[in-house]
Image: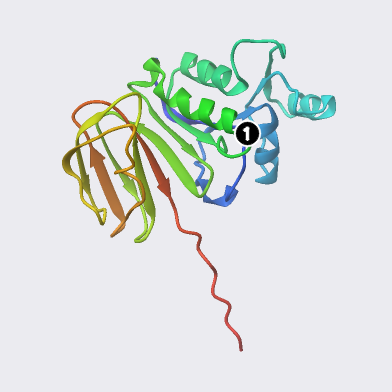
Amino acid sequence: MSKTERAVLFANGEAQSRAALALQGDDFLVAVDGGLHHLHALGLSPQLLIGDMDSLSAQEVEACKQAGAEVLRFPPAKNKTDLELALDEVLKRGYRNILIAFALGGRLDQTLGNLALLSRPDLGDCSVRIDDGLTEVALLRHIITLACQPGDTVSLLPWGGEAGGVVTHGLEYALEGETLLPWQTHGISNRCTGERFSVSLKHGALLLIHSRQIKIMEVQHD
């Protein structure tokens, strides 16, 4: 049965802005091995800790158990990454709205592998995003509308082949039914003009990368 709540998977990548995640009170919080440290930095505890625990101490794992978290431990020698195992688990539990936090940065192979997980066939009817607080990534097969700020950067990368019939609204350089090819850079570095933008396509898939602007706080002097 599909759950209406959201599962948030905390990976062990880089955190650009933890506070920008906009967590919800009924989120199902999953620590993916060392992603536990991101949860603790937010003053939160997971409901589920999953992975081979090679990035955690025995004391940290035991503390999670004592706090009431479910712990699923896997051997280090396995054919799936900890994040893929976590995706398997939340899908098995019926979650179809999934946020993967802090799965970017660090090792390039890990980042590319995490992005590739978005193209899993069984995610076709799910809403899945990767977000590190500054950059959000989604795999688009039909249409998507996202909130933004004027000046944010939006890049569209054909994924797995050409993407045809691409139409954008709310971006400075409009696409009006174009075909984007994976060996060209036509979809890179567009810019938002308002507070929302949308992208649609007729066939293929697009990796949508939305990079938010870093907000600089103004300091007032008396």
Query: Observer-nearest residue: 191 or 120?
Result: 191
Q: Position of residue 193 (x, y in %)?
A: 28, 59
Q: Which residue is mark 1?
A: 107
Q: Secondary structure at mark 1?
A: loop
Q: Residue furthest bottom?
A: 222
Query: Observer-nearest residue: 157 or 86?
Result: 157
Q: Residue furthest front?
A: 183
Q: Position of residue 32 (x, y in %)?
A: 63, 27
Left or right of 222, for residue 131: left
Left or right of 216, for residue 175: left
Q: Is residue 81 visible?
A: yes
| Residue at (47, 23) in percent of width and height | 117
Q: Position of residue 58 (x, y in %)?
A: 83, 24
Q: Is residue 29 visible?
A: no
> Residue flagged by tag 1: what amino acid is it?
Arg
For disc 1, the neighbor class at 10 Å (few under 14, some 14 to 19, many from 20) is: few
Q: Quarter of the image holding residue 98? A: top left
